[in-house]
Image (cartoon, grey):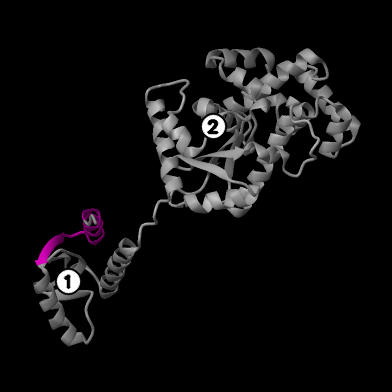
Amino acid sequence: MDWEPLRQQLEHIFEGPVKLLKWTWEQWLREADTAAKNKGTPPKSLYKDDQWVFFAQKESQDALILVVQRSAMTEAERQLVEMMLEARRTQEKKPVPAVSEEERKATLVREWFNQQQELGAANAEMPDSLVSQMSLYSTKIPLLLYGDYSPSRRVSYQELKKLLESFFDAEVILIPLMDKEWLLLGSEKMLSIDSADDRDYGDEESLEDTLAAIGYGLHEMLESEWVGECHLAIHYPMMPAKSLYGAVLQLRETMMLGRTYHVGSNMHLPWNLQLEKLINLIPEPEKNRFLERVLKRLDVALDAETLTTLEHFFELDCNVSETAKRLYIHRNTLLYRLDKFKQETSLDVRTFNDAVLVKIALLLYKVTKRK
């Protein structure tokens, strides 16, 4: 146990020298026995030569002690130091949880992934030894989980895995990638959970709807049952033996795009972010020039109400009636807002070309306003 940082902290607090020394174990026992006779109980600290001597820990046949001038601290401060040292010793005595064989294998995958990143690889196939150990030959559904919890919050691998398998009622492969970042690999059987047996999941649109339902359901459970706010990205089923590395890179890109262009949304679906992916490749100067050309009176035209109206309008495929219902306003009120926007920008979002321009401009506007 490293006591030097603590010694420095105490020295800073008491604005005076704090020494870290070693006594022989016999010397400490002798001094402690003398102090105990005076007090009647074994001491956590003792007074000697106008100094307070605090017991830190036993090292082989020595006692590690901290020495502070008596005049540097009050009686209450002395008791607080005793409590702090006792708490630290107790914490160090706690057994380190044993790492399961499953978690050890998952750690090997993480190390391999980090090695590929350091090499700058764009694609990489996993070694057969890792594939066989993790049973990654069958098709899996990949999900990337990022927990927005405090750095001091420790998340147990076993607890999280148990929670996931309880939710899916099936085995889940869990791989810790980075601090707060987890890769989940679920069975392809998840696609048929709570669904009719004759549903055609070969249809791409149905597949996307099912994957989205899985993601939203899992996200809701994690935020209520786990550690609060988190972000989740899901991708199409894939074969981990061939595509795991590329799938993780795609999931990270999906989460980055979602968090950049759709602040407030914690569930990120790649098929809903294709336009954002294209826009993200445009150089910054070009983005700014586009905004200047399309929306000359940007801050005037895009107040909070107009932004909300346009976002719902595009989300509902430019359907006036459905948008008015979603916003709980009269149809004519919505038309008035759209006409006002047209007057201020010369753009009519009820026409296809202008709708495309404004949709792109909105994505860029939200990003540039946060910089």
Q: Residue at x 54, y 14 (%)?
A: 285
In the picture, residue 239 is in which quadrant? Answer: top right
* Residue annotated with mark 1: 52
Q: Secondary structure at mark 1?
A: strand
How many numbered marks does the figure carry?
2
Residue 162: x %, y % from top left = 55, 52
Q: Secondary structure at mark 2?
A: loop
For the record, the magenta segment spans: 4-23
Q: Residue at x 76, y 15 (%)?
A: 354
User: How far apart are the alpha carbons under marks 2 and 1?
Assistant: 64 Å
* Residue type marked 1: Trp
Comparing 327 with 66, the one in front is 66
Residue 14: x %, y % from top left = 23, 62
Residue 30: x %, y % from top left = 10, 78
Q: Quick one: label 2 or label 1, which is nearer the N terminus?
A: 1
| Vertical placement of residue 15 versus 335, above or below | below
| Vertical placement of residue 7 versus 63, above or below | above
Say if residue 50 shows up in the picture. Answer: no
Q: Residues within 10 Å of mark 2 (few under 14, many from 20)?
A: few
* Residue annotated with mark 2: 137
Quadrant of image for the N terminus: bottom left
Side (left or right) of 194 relative to 68? right
